[in-house]
Amino acid sequence: MSRLVVGPFNRVEGDLEVRLEVASDQVTRAEVVSPLYRGFEQMLRGKDPRDGLVIAPRICGICSVSPSVAAAEALAAAQGLSPAPNGQLVTNIVHAVENIADHLTHFYMFFMPDFTRETYGDAPWFAATATRFAALKGTAAQDMLPQRAEFMHIVGLLAGKWPHTMAVQPGGVTRWVAANEVQRLLGLLATFRRFLQRVAIGVELEAFTALGTRQALFELVETHGPSHSDLFRFLQISEALGLHQLGRAEDRFLSFGAYRQGSGHLFARGLRDRSGPQKLNTGLIAEDVSHAWMQGPERALHPFEGVTEPDTEMAQGYTWCKAPRLAGDPAEVGALARQVVAEHPLALDLVAQGGNVEARIVARFLEMALLVPAMERWLREIRPPDAFIAHGDTPPETEGAGLVEAARGALGHWLRVEGGKIANYQIIAPTTWNFSPRDAAGRPGPLETALVGASRRPGETEPVAVQHIVRSFDPCMVCTVH
C-alpha cells in the first residue's frame, strides 16, 4: 500500500488537499482536507441581525448571490415576513443567472481542461479536445466568456452589481423594474438561449429537457456527431473513459428546493435514496465535529445550536470542514441532486446504477436548459405597478433559517437572535456536505466515498481519475469553512 497527497488543486476556488491510500493502483481510502479556516460565523456573533446581509455573502466572490438569498430568507423567517411577489421573481432571476454562470465556468474553465493532459495524448479525441478546451488558450473559452459576460448584465440591471449586491432583502428586492426593461432583459436571455442551443448543448432547450434516458441522449450524439456541441464532445470522452461508472458516492440526494414560486419551488425540496423519494425533515440535520479541527460536544448538533470554535490540537481532526449529516447519514448535493429529487426522467436514468461523474456534468446542462425558459416566464410575470419589496421588523428574541440551492447544492443559514443581536449564525455550504470528513461513526463524506476505487495510471503521482471525480462536484472550498 502507498500513500499519496493530491493537492493543492489548481482551478478550484480555495484550498484543497486529498490524502489517498492506494493498493494495486486503486484508491482504497480517502481523506479530504480543507486547510483554510476563515471564522465568518464568529464574526457575525454580536452583530445587528441585518449585518448578515452584508457579511455572509463575503464568504465567496463567485457565488455571492446564493448566500445573499439565504441570509435574506433567514432574516425573513425570523421576522415572519413574506416577500413581495415581484421581489421573489426578481430574486429568482438574479439567483438563476449566477447559478447558470457558475455551471458554465465549471464546465469550460475548471472541468474540461483536465482532458487535455498529456496522459490522454494517444486518445483519438485528444487533438480536437486540446484545441477546444486547453486552459486559457482553448477556443471554447473564447466563445463562452463573452456570452457569459453579456448574460451577467442581467444581474447588473436587476441587482446593481455583482458580486455582493445589496439588492436582495428579506422582503424582496430594492430594484423597481419597468415594463420596457423587461423587454431588454428578454432580449439578453434570447441571445444566451441561442448560445446554449448552437454551441453548448447543440439542440433546442425544450428538446433536450424532454429526453428521458441516457440512451436517448447518446442517440443525439450519434445523430449529430460529437463536434456538434461542447456537451456532445464531453459525452464522447465520457463514453470512451467510462465516466458513467466513476465516482459513485452515497446515492442519497438532498435538495432544499430551488427558486420559490407560490407555495413550492421550481425544483422540489426533498430527499431521495435507493428506496425512492423521502420527505425532507431539516430538523434532523446535525453537524459532527469529531474529525474537524473544532471544539464541540461529542454529540452532533443542529445548526441552531451549532458551535464553530477552532481547535488546532484536535487529535482526530484532519480538516476544518465539519461533517453535516441528515438523520445521521451523509448526503450528496448539487445540480444532479436537485434534478434527481425533482424526478426529472433523464437525471433518474443517469443515476440508475448510482451517481457518477458523467451524471453530475449532464445535470448542469439539464439545469441550464430548464432554467432559461423559467426565467423567460418569470420576467413576463413581473407586474411593474406592484411593489417589489415588503418591510418588517426583527423581534429581539427570534430565529430563522434560510434554505436555498446554490449552483453547487444545498446551502443553509441558521440565525438565532437574542437581545436584538445575533447570538448564533451557522452556515452549511454545499461543499461542506460533499467534502465532509468522517463522522463519529467513521462514516466518510460523499467525496471520500466516491474516490474509493479510482484508478492510478502508470507513473501518475496525481491520478487523473481523482481529478475528474473531485471536479465533478465543483468544489468551492472558501464556502466550505467559515
Image (spheres, grey):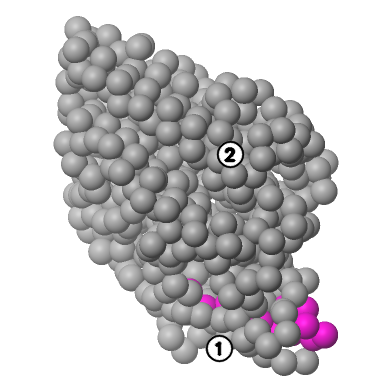
In the rendered structure, are the residues bearing label 1 and label 2 in contact, judged by CB atoms less than 8 Å apart? no
> Farthest bottom residue?
2
In this view, the residue in front, 346 or 122, is 122
Quadrant where the C terminus is found in the figure: bottom left
Name which residue type carries label 1: Ala
Quadrant where the N terminus is found in the figure: bottom right
Which comes before the other along the chain, label 1 or label 2?
2
Residue 124 position within the rendered picture, expressed as x and y whole percent measured from the top left: 69, 61
- Pointer 2 residue: 228
Q: Name the secondary structure under disc 1.
A: loop
Q: How many marks are shown on the rendered structure?
A: 2
Q: Is residue 130 above or below residue 302?
A: below
Q: Quadrant of residue 162?
A: top left
**Relative side of 397 to 303, left or right:** left
Find out whether residue 202 is within the magenta segment: no
Find out whether residue 23 is within the magenta segment: yes
Name which residue type carries label 2: His
Disc 1 vs disc 2: which is toward the camera?
2
**Relative side of 449 to 135, left or right:** right
- Pointer 1 residue: 315
Q: Label 1: how many residues lie within 10 Å, few (<14), some (14-19) or many (20+)?
A: few
Residue 132 position within the rendered picture, expressed as x and y whole percent measured from the top left: 49, 55
Task: Read off the magenta span.
Answer: 16-29
Residue 455 position within the rendered picture, expressed as x and y whole percent measured from the top left: 75, 75
Q: Is residue 46 above or below residue 233?
A: below
